[in-house]
Amino acid sequence: MPFLDPTATHPLVFPDGRTHPDMVHLNRVIDHPNMQIGDHSYANDFAPPQDWAAHLAPYLYPGAPERLVIGRFCQIAHGVRFITASANHAMTGFTTYPFGVFDPETLEAYRGSFADLPDTIIGHDVWIGHGALILPGVTLGNGVIVGAGAVVARDVPDYAIVAGNPARVLRLRFAPEVIVRLLALAWWDQPLARLRGALPALVGDDIDVLETAFAP
């Protein structure tokens, strides 16, 4: 079996050869014009849905003004939801009730008021914990960890750990100068053969060793 086969629908294989049915490579099970998902990004759900796109981003319909972009090597736990910008109601008038969606004659004008909505962007190597909620227009930087049950309403910087409702930054995973070097290295763009050879350095915490592992 190849190392980290990006074409596999179910990436986790047990020692007896069975695949784990609750875990999927998202870009193998989602074909949605408003979703862009990098290789090796997976989701795990205790009750795997028939429609993973609608399960993860229930308000993102084909042709909506916004996108959900997920980078490579992301890890998405059970119960995570992305509330994309089309879920919002107009808040400038006296009521937020979406009258326009219920009348075909007014629907197009209503849709026109929701043009140019912000995308939701998830960087590379992001771990989103159990039951977290990512709100409209949020950008999660590379290497971010989102705690279980967090409600993320604002952008999160690279390699930050956030938790709570509303989510707040608890700390950075590494010193700022190490983060700069990690972003320059961009290990998620390396060929799989180099990743396999660099596994000890990738799971370690010595940036010098990691850079050496990927040196030309």
Image (cartoon, rainbow, N blue to C red):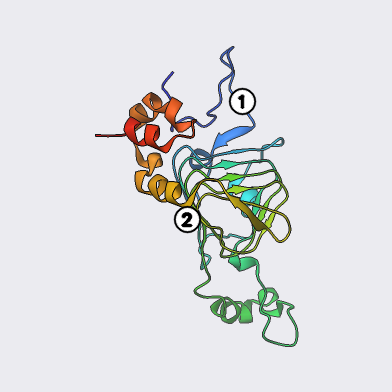
Q: Position of residue 56 (x, y in %)?
A: 63, 50
User: Could you tell which of marks 2 and 1 lies nearer the N-terminus?
Assistant: 1
Q: Amino acid at mark 1?
A: His
Check residue 33 in the rendering and tell me which mark sits there, or answer none: 2
Image quarter hosting the C terminus: top left
Residue positioned 45% across, 32% down in the render? 202
Q: Position of residue 171 (x, y in %)?
A: 61, 51
Q: Residue furthest left?
A: 216
Q: Amino acid at mark 2?
A: Pro
Q: Secondary structure at mark 1?
A: loop
Q: Tell me if mark 2 has few (under 14), some (14-19) or many (20+) residues whose alpha carbon lies within 10 angstroms of its own.
A: few
Q: Residue furthest top?
A: 16
Residue 4 at least partly seen: no
Residue positioned 67% across, 85% down in the render? 92
Image vertical order of residue 166 relative to residue 56, above or below: below
For the residue pair 122 and 16, the one nearer the viewer reads as 122
